[in-house]
Amino acid sequence: MSLQWGAGYRIAACRGHVCKRQRVKCTEKRGHEQATIRAPWHKEARITVTHPEVVEDLASRSQQRLALLLTAVVIGLAALLLPFAAVPLAPLPHISGMYGAATAMIDLATFWLLASAPRQPRSHAIIAAAYLFGGLMAVVHVLTYPGAVLIGQAVVGSPHAVSLLFIAWRAGFAGFILWAVLAAARDQAAARSKAGSLPFVLAVLSMVGAFIVSQLTDAAAVATVSGRELFGALSLHGSYAAAVLAVITVVMIWRRRLWSRSIFGWLVFVLVAEAAAVWLSTFSGGRYTLAWYATRVEGIIANTVVLVLLASHFRNLQMDLAKTVSMLELRTEGLQAEIHRRESAEVKLAQAKKLEAVGQLGAGLAHDLNNILQVVTARLAILQRRVGSVVDADVEVIQRNVRKADALTRQLTLLSGRRNHNARPLGLAKTLPSIAESLRTLLGRRHELVVDVEPNLPPIAVDALELEIALTNLVTNARDAMPEGGRVDIAARRAPGPDGASGIDIQVRDVGHGMPPELRDRAFEPFFTTKEPGKGTGLGLPQVHGFVTASAGHVAVQSEPGHGTVVTMSFPTHAQRPAGLPDQDFSAQASHPLRAGQVVLLVDDNGDVREASAQLLCASGCIVRQAPNAFAALTLLMGGFRPGLLISDVVMPGGIDGVELAHRAKALRPELGIVLVTGYSDAADSAKAEGFPVVRKPYDLASLARALS
């Protein structure tokens, strides 16, 4: 039996302040077996009932009043009928058949409802057996009553069998209820055990036994006098005994205080009605009297009341169950949505961590590669100065491949979205057509490139070179998706941002074979590629993702097999760019131009880079003093060395990096010009924010001179 909100319960065993036979109130709206209940005699006493075996359903005050009122009405009607009990009426034997059939249906339906309750206590199983016994006896009553089915005779049995079976019927029902009263005491004393099928077996055996005994005996139960069927001494004494047994059962219910429990409260009403009916019908002296007819109607009404109450109770349980199922369905849907959200978040987090890890690896590789490229670039410039124009063609080839390697290092550093961008306001009306010219060479004759820029677009703050690299990657993918040729569209449009502000969307669209969902979801995964070996590195789309993210934007891919692919890069306008992101290249802010005779302090921990850079500066007429680390440079400055320009690498070992060296050098020599160079470093952002010009490796003499000027 599940706990019902607002109903009272009796605790069957002591639990702290809650003691046996005390009423408590359920204070939580739960239709489950577990609920917290509060004892009225102790405001702070709260217990949690986790086993339904220790609680019993108590009748509400209104139920108790209604049961007592109906009981009083039954007794009152019996008293009113008493003076007229023996008034003879027309004999209608079929009335007994109708009474038996109706009672059988009501009792068997009541039995089915009681027996179908899950995990019921033993006392409830015995009550169900009582109604099973009553229903079966009602069937036998109809079969043995003369005229109930066949005109003038019974279907089976002797003329006296029906009276004996009636006595056994009424006494047996009261006896089963008395057994349930005794079993209820054991239900209260300990946790209930399984009821089992014993009560139901005994109910069937009792019916069979009563029928056999009624057929074997020929004791006179009725006699016909002057055309009237009167009860014999056996019927009178047996019926009175059955009525007395019903009264004893009512007294036992009262003495054991079971009347406060819902089912026993209504059984008091039924037993009183049974006792009054049996006694009044017997007192009339025979069949077909006013009392005989009235008590049968009264019995049907009494049993119907219990059936209606049980049906109403089960209907309420079904409604509660339906509400619980609906609630569970809603919670399940919410749980599934939450699981889906968490799975999606976990996938995104895993991808972000993967990008972060690869980005950190790429940053380290980029730093080392840029140092190597710096040595190559500087030595190449020196070689070209020494040899002359003879090697110009070879120098051009080497420089072109150095630029390709530089672009590759940019892709590596963009994976984490933390690369130092040289962001500047760009007008797309001029920038995109300019980039498209180099992209058309990349596409070839079989592919058409169309650029469409909406007029009067506001500028966006991005790194122009990295935008070109991103578009190059996207157009290359579009070309590879259309091996037979096709059209690639690059469009720039205004678009609403996530916060309602307008932004700029740059879309690259192709009409290639598209991507299935499982590939589309992995598009930005580093080193993931579906191209043949040697034709793709798996860094193109990750570079796009890193570039757009670092530019305070977001990128999305729409693609279906056979319907092409659309990649949308969304950027805020320059006026709405978040604070903290640099808007321009600070390398142009150097106040000390490169000039002949200028004294330069060059600091770099890499000997090859330091030597190549020194020769590059010396070739321009500078006087260069080298230092392998920040400590050596500070020693020179504190020792009286007075350079006009300090050029230092950002990332150096020893505990003092280039940014810290710049601060200390400024404190020693406020007039000192400072330029920082780096292949990759997070510290470059802070250096730019503090006004120090930063030059990215690899650089040649011309780019360094332009940065310093």
Image (tube, rainbow, N blue to C red):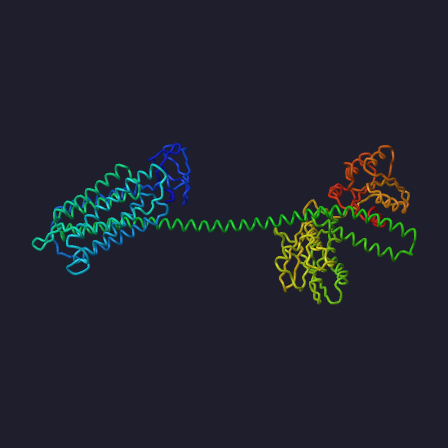
Residue 285: give x, y in percent of width and height.
12, 48
The foreground one among 508 and 95 is 95
Locate residue 679 relative to residue 38 in the image: left or right: right
Instruction: State the residue at coordinates (16%, 48%).
Output: 281
Locate residue 442 relative to residue 190 in the image: left or right: right
Instruction: State the residue at coordinates (58%, 50%).
Output: 343
Res 562 → quadrant: bottom right
Residue 498: give x, y in percent of width and height.
61, 51
The foreground one among 445 and 208 is 208
Residue 610: give x, y in percent of width and height.
85, 43
Counting the numbered discs, the total is 0
Locate residue 280 relative to residue 678 in the image: left or right: left
Residue 505: give x, y in percent of width and height.
66, 56
Question: Which quadrant: the N terminus?
Answer: top left
Q: Most extreme residue toward the left, as rendered?
A: 226
